[in-house]
Amino acid sequence: MHKGLKVCILFEGRDGAGKGGTIKAITERVSPRVFRVIALPAPTAREKSQMYAQRYLPHLTWKLSPMDLKSYDRWDDHTKARDEMFAATDSSWAPWFVAQSEDKKRVRLNVISHLLKHVPYKDVPATKVKLPARKVGKYKAVDFPFKYVPELF
């Protein structure tokens, strides 16, 4: 039975980690009515004082915006904040997973495979469609000089 349950996935990482490409690979062939991707701007002063997750909870499907150029000077600060966030928020019901992203194509496939293994789903039953017999042969196509797209592959 299709229950319409929801899954929330948060991608967090440094510039060039492959977050955007992975999100695109996951969502490019799905309905935008079903999937939402939200890129948030830099946090406001108020958001900086909140618990990490508070900034994202109102959106319920997250994609963090890329860090600006100043982030390069704060690499260690970001690493420390990430470690503290993992320690404070990792749980059995909402675990963090880290994906090695040196090879972007592989990390996308690994993340998609991981999601499919961890999200319980069943095929939604579809009604079988029986097409009537096709009526062919009553119309004679004209001899038009069609221009064809080259078949390179």
Image (cartoon, rainbow, N blue to C red):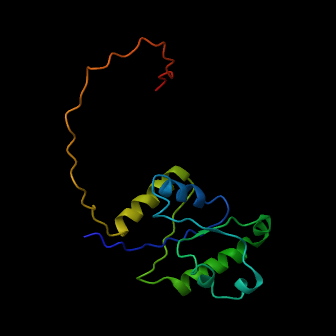
Whether residue 8 sits left or right of residue 3 in the image: it is: right
x%, y% of residue 104?
Answer: 55, 52
x%, y% of residue 19?
Answer: 58, 61
Q: Which quarter of the figure has residue 64?
A: bottom right
Query: What residue lies at 65% left-to-right and 80% top-to-bottom?
Result: 81
x%, y% of residue 2?
Answer: 29, 69
Residue 44 to residue 49: above or below: above
Whether residue 105 sits left or right of residue 128 in the image: it is: right
Whether residue 104 sits left or right of residue 65 in the image: it is: left
x%, y% of residue 117?
Answer: 35, 65
Q: Residue furthest front?
A: 138
Q: Depth check: 10 or 61 in front?
A: 61
Location of the N terminus (image quadrant): bottom left
Query: What residue lies at 77% left-to-right and 84% top-to-bottom?
Result: 45
Query: What residue lies at 37% left-to-right and 16% top-to-bottom?
Result: 141
Query: What residue lies at 68% left-to-right and 62% top-to-bottom?
Result: 15
